[in-house]
Amino acid sequence: QKEVEQNSGPLSVPEGAIASLNCTYSDRVSQSFFWYRQYSGKSPELIMSIYSNGDKEDGRFTAQLNKASQYVSLLIRDSQPSDSATYLCAVKHSSGSARQLTFGSGTQLTVLP
Amino acid sequence: DTEVTQTPKHLVMGMTNKKSLKCEQHMGHRAMYWYKQKAKKPPELMFVYSYEKLSINESVPSRFSPECPNSSLLNLHLHALQPEDSALYLCASSQTRTSGSGPEQYFGPGTRLTVT
């Protein structure tokens, strides 16, 4: 059973702080990792993808991948109330259909003004 | 253009009705997906089409019938649904790389389905 685990939260941070969202996965040979943001009542929006060990930065977002530890994280700098949403970690595995993603249960983030 | 569109936005149907959900993308993607999402749960894969052929059916009940008329369109035909089928139905599309990094899946806005 391929698993993706996230802290369900809720995670609350004050405006302007760094929000840190974490995700672990069980399939050691997973290749691709994605972070989706989902506002209440809306569909998931892809905000970051990462494929290699290390950091990948895009604006206020930084994704970090450590394949040895089977760990991927998302940092949101200078958090804004508009960042309040559920963040879904998704992993593409190497076996089975290469187009299948496994989603974590999501972390609910609240940024307090 | 990373847009996937879905119609209708909302749908209320009785258990004896037949209805269809529609999805369209113009990104040149050749893989399209149907997901079901219940409240406070992650999306749950239902079907995958690759090059207009059904490649994955995640043991979905036959009251859900997918169709891919061409590379841009995906339909989900609904018949004799149950109240527990009420959910957000999401369409997504992606490229069809099967090795290496990616592919990224892009979701449409979803159809909120209520079965009465």
Image (cartoon, coloured by chain):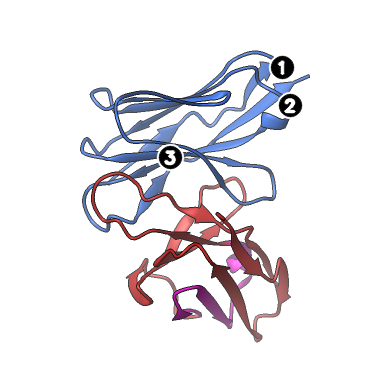
Chain colours: A blue, B red
Residue A34: which numbered mark, if any? 3
Q: Magenta-highlighted stretch: main secondary structure?
A: strand
Q: Quadrant of the N terminus of chain B?
A: bottom right
Q: Earlier in the sequence, mark 1 or mark 2?
A: 1
Q: Tell me where residue B58 appears, x and y as whole percent.
A: 37, 66
Q: Is residue B99 above or below residue A22?
A: below
Look at the numbered disc 2 and give the secondary structure of its residue. Answer: helix
Report in which chain the residue with disc 2 lies. A
Callouts 2 and 3 in the same chain? yes
Q: Amino acid at mark 2?
A: Pro
Q: Tell me where residue A47 appears, x and y as whole percent.
A: 53, 38
The number of numbered badges drawn on the structure is 3
Residue B114 part of the magenta-drawn span: no
Look at the numbered disc 3 and give the secondary structure of its residue. Answer: strand
- Going by the picture, which residue comes out furthest to the right? A113
Magenta stretch bounds: B64-89
> Residue at the spot x=21%, y=51% of the render?
A95
Quarter of the figure with residue B115:
bottom right
Q: Earlier in the sequence, mark 1 or mark 3?
A: 1
> Residue at the spot x=27%, y=40% of the render?
A31
Report in which chain the residue with disc 3 lies. A
Q: Is residue B58 above or below residue A27?
A: below
For the residue pair A76 and B83, the one nearer the viewer reads as: A76
- State the CA–CA distance, disc 1 to disc 3: 25 Å
Quarter of the figure with residue B71:
bottom left
Estimate how packed mark 1 is, as few (under 14), some (14 to 19) or many (20 or more) residues with alpha carbons within 10 Å. some
Residue A81: which numbered mark, if any? 2
Residue A15: which numbered mark, if any? 1
Q: Earlier in the sequence, mark 2 or mark 3?
A: 3
> Residue at the spot x=62%, y=50% of the render?
B39
Q: Is residue A112 left or right of residue A5?
A: right
Q: Are marks 1 and 2 in contact (CB under 8 Å)?
A: yes
